[in-house]
Amino acid sequence: MTLRVVSNSTPLIALARIRRFQLLRELFGEINIPLAVYDEVVNAGKGRAGVIEVESADWIHYHQVSNSDLVAFLRISLDAGEAEAIALASVSCCVTITVMLRILKTPLMNYWHKGSD
């Protein structure tokens, strides 16, 4: 079974900012994002890190979230992108990148340090 990964905007923007955006493709192959994340990064983020990367990445797939009740509940304490990412992951049997980054913390740190030599 292929691991399906969902991202919120933070990993996309952060990795674009440090010019390591392709690391997402290297680690996960494809990324799924809800439309709220696309809107946060591309539309609301015009002129900032991540816009060009997300717009041009053919390995990032955009999805409309169907579970509006879950999104509304999560919006009590999360922003739209985070809420939709969790909702998308919950119905798609996906894992969010935030969780994956915690699991991969040591390998990622080794990669970044090796890449900066």
Image: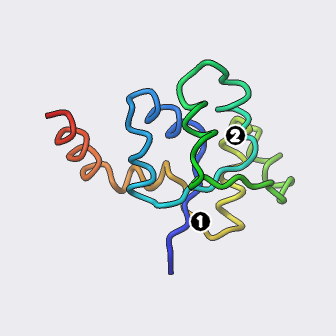
On the image, the x and y values in percent for residue 77 come to 70, 37
The residue carrying pointer 2 sits among few (fewer than 14), some (14 to 19) or many (20 or more) residues within 10 Å by Cα, namely many
Q: How is the image coloured?
A: rainbow
Which residue has dot 2 on it? 38
On the image, the x and y values in percent for residue 19 come to 39, 32
The dot on residue 73 is none
The dot on residue 94 is 1
Type of residue at label 2?
Tyr
Q: Is 83 in front, or is 8?
A: 8
How many marks the image carries: the answer is 2
Direction bottom: furthest residue: 1
- The local secondary structure at tag 2 comes to helix
Where on the picture, by quarter, is residue 21?
A: top left
- The local secondary structure at tag 1 comes to loop
On the image, the x and y values in percent for residue 28 come to 45, 59
Where on the picture, by quarter, is residue 67?
A: bottom right
On the image, the x and y values in percent for residue 72 come to 83, 46
Direction left: furthest residue: 117
Judge whether 34 appears above or below 54 on screen.
Answer: below
Single out the mark in the foreground, 1 or 2: 2
Judge whether 45 appears above or below 70 on screen.
Answer: above
Judge whether 25 appears above or below 36 on screen.
Answer: below
Disc with the residue nearer the chain's start (1 vs 2): 2
Q: Is 11 in front, or is 16?
A: 16
Q: Is disc 1 in contact with disc 2, using a CB cutoff of under 8 Å?
A: no
Direction top: furthest residue: 47
For image coordinates 38% across by 47% down, the residue present is: 23
Type of residue at label 1?
Cys
For image coordinates 25% across by 40% down, the residue present is: 112
Question: Could you give the CA–CA distance between mark 1 and mark 2, rounded to whole angstroms?
Answer: 18 Å
For image coordinates 67% across by 21% down, the residue present is: 46
